[in-house]
Amino acid sequence: MKVFTYVFLPILFAAQAVAQSVEFGVDSKTGALDSIRVSGDSRDMNWTLKAGQKRYIKAADQWGLGRFVQTDAYGTQTQRAWSAPVKVENSGGAAKSVYDCGDVEITVAREQKNGDLLETYSFKNKSANALKISDIAVNTPFNDNYDKSDICLNGRCHAHIWADGGDSSYVCAINMGARAPHLGLVMVSGAMDGYEISKRSKKTGMSNFRGVIAMRLKPFELGAGRTKSFKWTLFSHAGWDDFFEKARSRGAITAHFKTPTTAVLGEKIEVVFKGKTRNPEVLVNGA
């Protein structure tokens, strides 16, 4: 494991104006994202892993590609993956990639909206029978890994993931140099079902490489000819307080401890839930 000694100067923490838009680049061969950047960022930081950045990062690991399991009416399970598009459209501020996965067509639409990058993942059942779609993993390979210290400070992040929050799930990615702008992700339609890590091993550096991160989406049933969509939005922020405020403004509900987060048996714990939704239903451990 590499050990770095960082010397932080006051100028490192000077926050940039964070009313900045999220920009993206599309790989024409895969239809996936090969860059996610914040406009006006003097570091020109790419928040996503790029194919070839490490010898073990391949095109199939790019942002927005993924896999799922399809179960038909007879209980037959088929593993599917999307990585080779049948159509890619890219007009700069908007893009669409379409993938043929047998009985299921997947469309990934992206658009810049009020400075955010809105991504929509749609699953369409092309068959004549209902299908169950499960084990859905969508690559979101945040650039969370250790390199040379100057590269870490200017071009890497810590991805703080809360993917067990269902339709209020989020990711707060913080630049390793603690300098804004940072990047946030909030679910705005549909629900997450956890996340997973791949390609993390002794050969890839263990704790020096967070791995290829993928968000898991909640399983669902899909009638013949029907479409199910999931949406999340990416936005810039200035740090945790700004992130939570912006996350709530985009529909998320956030939890905050009023009491210390470490407690012994019998002690009272107070948690405050905050959101912009009027009278939201909050479930704790499903109840």
Image: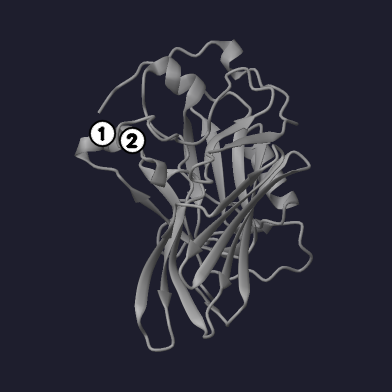
Which amino acid type corresponds to the residue marked 2 in the rendered image? Phe
Q: Secondary structure at mark 1?
A: loop
Residue 223: image location, x then y, percent: 58, 82
Q: Which corner quadrant of the image does residue 16 belong to?
A: top right
Residue 263: image location, x then y, percent: 44, 55
Q: Quadrant of the N terminus?
A: top left
How many neighbours does mark 1 have within 10 angstroms: few (below 14), some (14-19), or many (20 or more)? some
Name above or below for residue 220 compared with residue 120: below
Pick whichever, 204 or 280, lies toward us. 204
Name above or below for residue 123 compared with residue 260: below
Q: Secondary structure at mark 2?
A: loop
Which amino acid type corresponds to the residue marked 1 in the rendered image? Gly
User: Measuring 36% from the left and 50% from the top, which residue is drawn there?
Assistant: 197
User: Measuring 35% from the left and 42% from the top, which residue is drawn there?
Assistant: 211
How many neighbours does mark 2 have within 10 angstroms: few (below 14), some (14-19), or many (20 or more)? some
Which residue, as the protein is rendered here, is positioned at the far bottom?
74
User: Measuring 50% from the left and 45% from the top, which residue is drawn there?
Assistant: 63
Residue 285 showing in the rendered view: no
Disc 1 to disc 2: CB gap under 8 Å: yes
Give the residue number, with chain letter if any, for mark 1: 205
Which residue, as the protein is rendered here, is positioned at the far front?
86
Give the residue number, with chain letter if any, for mark 2: 209
Q: Mark 1 and mark 2: span between their CA atoms?
A: 6 Å
Residue 252: image location, x then y, percent: 67, 56
Q: Quadrant of the C terminus?
A: bottom right
Q: Which corner quadrant of the image does residue 10 belong to?
A: top right
Name above or below for residue 66 compared with residue 228: above
Residue 21 showing in the rendered view: yes
Residue 110: image location, x then y, percent: 66, 48
- Disc number at residue 219? none
User: Measuring 61% from the left and 78% from the top, which residue is drawn there?
Assistant: 225
